[in-house]
Amino acid sequence: MKHIKRKSLLYKTGVEYGDYTINHIQGCSHGCKYPCYAMAMAKRFGKARTYEEWCEPKLVENALDIIDQEIPKYRNKIKSVHLCFTSDPFMYGYKEVSEMSYLIIKKLNNAGIKCTVLTKGILPINLADLSLENEYGITLVSLNKNFINNFEPYAAPIEERIQALKNLHDKGCKTWVSIEPYPTPNFIEQDIKTILEAISFCDKIIFGRLNYNKKVSEYRNYKQFFNSCAQTVEEFCKENNKKCHIKEGTVTDMCEKDIR
């Protein structure tokens, strides 16, 4: 794969459930078509001109050296570091990316810094050898293979994604699932309870609506739909003693016009 160099990596994120983050890969081979906000931003700032270019990831080859330089600078400010918000740390089919991500997490842990991880790839079992304060997550918005193949064409198969997370859970690791971006029924008819049951072993669930796609607003009752789904997730988490986070903008205050 291609390599690039950077001068800095760790930075404070504005994402609502994040603290610091690191994005040591530019681009993402998974090629998600929801659309992908990270790809849109990369195009806007000239880091990827086309979809095809975005799908050819570039690894920051000096990432470990930068981490060594930045840990002393930020150690006392950081509560946790998230991998990653603009790419995937365990990109499916890219062993070099996974190995780099593991070494970054290990360095941060050795400095007493907790890490959180989110992937559509396969979480390696050797993550269980690192700090048990880390939190490992997968994205899962559907169990329907046809839907996933259309919207996450090059991501890891659903079953493998879930099983890798379960393996870490069984090793005593903290695990979570991001059910975002969740689609409306005009994309796919599905019951969110089925998804919740499939990942009932995890410790935390984050739920968020699909954005940046005009087809969502074409579904007449989309506000009610997302409100109902969020309530289902909250109730499931409460009944099963799990942490729950509903993303900002997912739940809407309804007025009479909205429910006609």
Image (tube, rainbow, N blue to C red):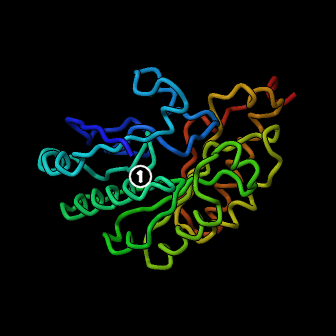
Left/right placement of residue 72 relative to residue 214 reads left
Percent coordinates x, y for residue 252 in the rendering:
67, 33
Percent coordinates x, y for residue 108 in the rendering:
24, 58
The residue lying furthest to the bottom in this view is 171
Q: Nearer the viewer, residue 241 or 121?
A: 121
Instruction: Judge whether 143 appears above or below 254 on screen.
Output: below
Q: Nearer the viewer, residue 179 or 7?
A: 7
Left/right placement of residue 111 relative to residue 98 reads left
- Which residue appears at 56% of the width and 35% of the height? 36
- Which residue appears at 44% of the width and 43% of the height? 87
Instruction: Judge whether 57 appears above or below 96 on screen.
Output: above
Q: How many marks?
A: 1
- Which residue appears at 35% of the width and 38% of the height? 13
Q: Which residue is mark 1?
A: 89
Q: Amino acid at mark 1?
A: Pro
Left/right placement of residue 121 relative to residue 147 reads left
- Which residue appears at 52% of the width and 66% of the height? 203
Quarter of the figure with residue 212: top right
